[in-house]
Amino acid sequence: MATNRLNRINEDIQRELSVLIPRVKDPRVQQGMVTVTGVETTPDLRYAKVYISILGEVNEKELRRGLRSAGPWLRRELGSNMTLRYTPELVCERCRS
C-alpha cells in the first residue's frame, strides 16, 4: 500500500515521462504512440515500474529495446527535472488491466 507521498511521486514521474518519451530520438520508440498509464515506485525510490500503453502497429519487442536503450537518458532527465534523493531506475511494463 502506497503512502500519500509515494502516490504524489508516482504521479509526478508519470507526468514527466509522458513529456519525455515523445522526445526520445530512437526510431524504435517513434514507431507508434506510447502513453504512460501508471507508475509504481518502490518505497526506497530505487526502482519504478512504468506501465505503458501502445497505440498503432508497432513491433513491441523493438519498442521495449528502444525504451531500454533510452533508459539512462530518461533517468538523467527525470533526475534533473525532479528533486528526489534517488532517481529511480525505470523498468517498462506492458499496460496493466
Image: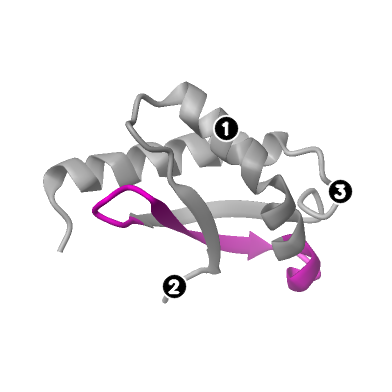
From the viewer's side, name the closer residue of 39 and 47: 47
Colouring of the image: one colour
Residue under label 3: 27
Q: Is residue 31 visible?
A: yes
Compared to 90, does 95 lie above or below? below
Sequence-earlier tag: 2 or 1: 1
Q: Viewed as shown, does residue 62 lie left or right of 67?
A: right
Q: Is residue 50 magenta?
A: yes
Q: Viewed as shown, does residue 14 lie left or right of 58?
A: left
User: In which quadrant is the N terminus drawn?
Assistant: bottom left
Horizontal and vertical percent for residue 90?
A: 51, 52
The amino acid at mark 2 is Arg
Q: Which mark is residue 96?
A: 2
Q: Which mark is residue 76?
A: 1
Q: Residues within 10 Å of mark 1 (few under 14, many from 20)?
A: few
Q: Which residues are magenta?
A: 41-63
Q: Viewed as shown, does residue 67 lie left or right of 74?
A: right
Label 3 vs label 2: CA separation? 25 Å
The amino acid at mark 3 is Pro
Horizontal and vertical percent for residue 35?
A: 57, 52
